[in-house]
Image: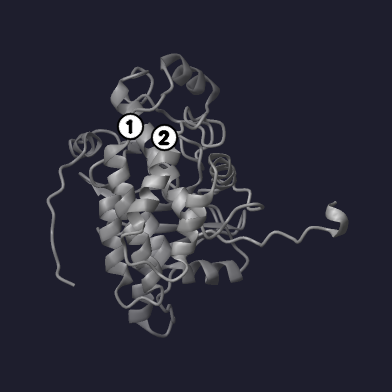
């Protein structure tokens, strides 16, 4: 794979940080590059990977997400009063569970499916696309409800990644549109209409769980940790050495796929400096992956999470429960068969 480089313009938050200001609380998704950069990272990770076909399909899905985000139509947004009410209640103003979804998300879903049909797809994916094409609007909304509430019963795991991808585009568009609207600019950090909420473990914009956390470096500060929203791609600051589920600052440990044989100093050093680790908490029994952007500037919370699913399996076997969620790869039990007599 040919190496390439791009020049990235710093955001307003990064400029403030590099100028010696406070650590920015938010990092916002970039409309022009968010999913395009994820697509590139997925293709990079797919090279020689055991899940290469799946990662390449995820790259194609990210490609359609970028196109959808670029063309997304205007949708209803919360006004200043709604933003203020959410702020006073310490709640996210675009709650994934309760926000009245605009039909535009379904239109983009169907456009994304049409776009995907022109790609080289793994066996079985076309059947999932056919199922989405056949689904009524009501069925798509029911599937969206399952995804956004975390209720696995009734969720079609085959179609879930594509439907989730459209929901990600919609909520990212919502957040960026609210940011651009200027509503409620007096309440948030750096004149943002969004602000901190009571529960630091979920997204301050939509209330969704994170996929992973990401460390960033800016100015004189290194290794600032941000949680990456699984739905709207907003990143919010949470202090390092703190469990992202219960907030404990004790009994935390870090695990990676690198061999950490104490008798092998090189292996132990690689494990300690791995770009992707699982941060586990003995106090609550949960874990969340942490991606070290200061060790590898190309890591992407969603792409690298998918590529390190083996780490999830190993940590889960040790009895840890994941705090976050990756909507691109969900696991669940099949629905039980109906009881005799249809009861």
Residue at point 13%, 63% (across, down): 4
Closer-to-camera residue (261/300):
300
- Residues at badges 2 and 1 in contact (C-beta under 8 Å)? yes
Q: Quadrant of residue 20?
A: top left
Residue 83's label in the rendered image is: none
Q: CA distance from mark 2 to mark 1?
A: 7 Å
Q: Quadrant of the N terminus?
A: bottom left
Residue 52: image x %, image y %? 36, 73
The image shows residue 114, relative to residue 52, as above or below, that is: above
* Residue 305 coordinates in the image, percent (x, y): 42, 61
Q: Within 10 Å of the Cα at label 2, are there few (<14), some (14-19), or many (20+) other Cα atoms?
A: some
Q: Which residue is painted at 42% across and 45% down in the image?
A: 109
- The answer to whether residue 57 is left or right of residue 248 is left
Whether residue 325 is visible here, answered yes or no, is: no
- Give above or below for 33 relative to 264: above
Q: Which residue is mark 1?
A: 73
Classify residue 78 by image quadrant: top left
Q: Neighbour class for label 1 at 10 Å: few (<14), some, many (≥20)?
A: few
Q: Position of residue 280 (x, y in %)?
A: 53, 60
Q: Is residue 3 visible?
A: yes
Q: Residue furthest front?
A: 134
Q: Secondary structure at mark 2?
A: helix
Most extreme residue toward the top is 81
Label 1: element kind:
loop
Q: Which residue is mark 2?
A: 104
Q: Nearer the viewer, residue 275 or 307?
A: 307
- Along the line of sight, which residue is nearer the eye, 183 or 204? 183
Q: Earlier in the sequence, mark 2 or mark 1?
A: 1
Q: What's the residue at 44%, 71% (across, down)?
A: 123
């Amino acid at each position: 794979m040919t190496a390439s480089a791009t020049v990235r313009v710093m955001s307003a938050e990064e400029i403030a940080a590099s100028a010696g200001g406070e650590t920015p609380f938010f990092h916002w998704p970039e409309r022009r590059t968010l999913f395009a950069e994820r697509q590139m990272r997925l293709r990079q990770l797919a090279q020689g990977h055991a899940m290469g076909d799946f990662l390449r399909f995820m790259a194609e899905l990210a490609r359609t997400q970028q196109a959808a985000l670029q063309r997304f139509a205007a949708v209803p947004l919360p006004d200043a009063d709604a933003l203020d009410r959410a702020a006073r209640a310490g709640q996210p103003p675009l709650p994934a569970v309760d926000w009245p979804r605009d039909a535009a998300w379904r239109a983009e879903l169907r456009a994304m499916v049409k776009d995907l049909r022109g790609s080289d797809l793994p066996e079985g994916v076309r059947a999932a696309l056919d199922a989405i094409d056949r689904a009524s609007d009501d069925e798509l909304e029911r599937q969206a409800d399952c995804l956004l509430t975390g209720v696995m019963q009734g969720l079609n795991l085959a179609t879930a990644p594509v439907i989730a991808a459209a929901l990600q585009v919609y909520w990212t568009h919502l957040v960026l549109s609210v940011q651009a609207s200027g509503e409620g600019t007096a309440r948030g950090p750096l004149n943002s209409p969004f602000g901190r909420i009571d529960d630091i473990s979920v997204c301050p914009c939509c209330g969704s769980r994170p996929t992973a956390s990401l460390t960033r470096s800016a100015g004189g500060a290194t290794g600032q940790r941000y949680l990456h929203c699984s739905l709207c791609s907003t990143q919010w600051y949470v202090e390092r050495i703190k469990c992202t589920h219960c907030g404990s600052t004790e009994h935390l440990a870090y695990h990676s796929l690198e061999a950490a044989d104490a008798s092998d100093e090189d292996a132990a050093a690689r494990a300690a400096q791995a770009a992707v680790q699982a941060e586990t908490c003995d106090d609550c029994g949960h874990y969340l992956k942490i991606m070290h952007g200061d060790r590898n500037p190309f890591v992407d919370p969603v792409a690298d999470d998918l590529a390190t699913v083996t780490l999830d399996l190993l940590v889960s076997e040790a009895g840890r429960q994941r705090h976050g969620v990756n909507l691109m790869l969900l696991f669940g039990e099949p629905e039980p068969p109906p009881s005799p007599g249809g009861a």
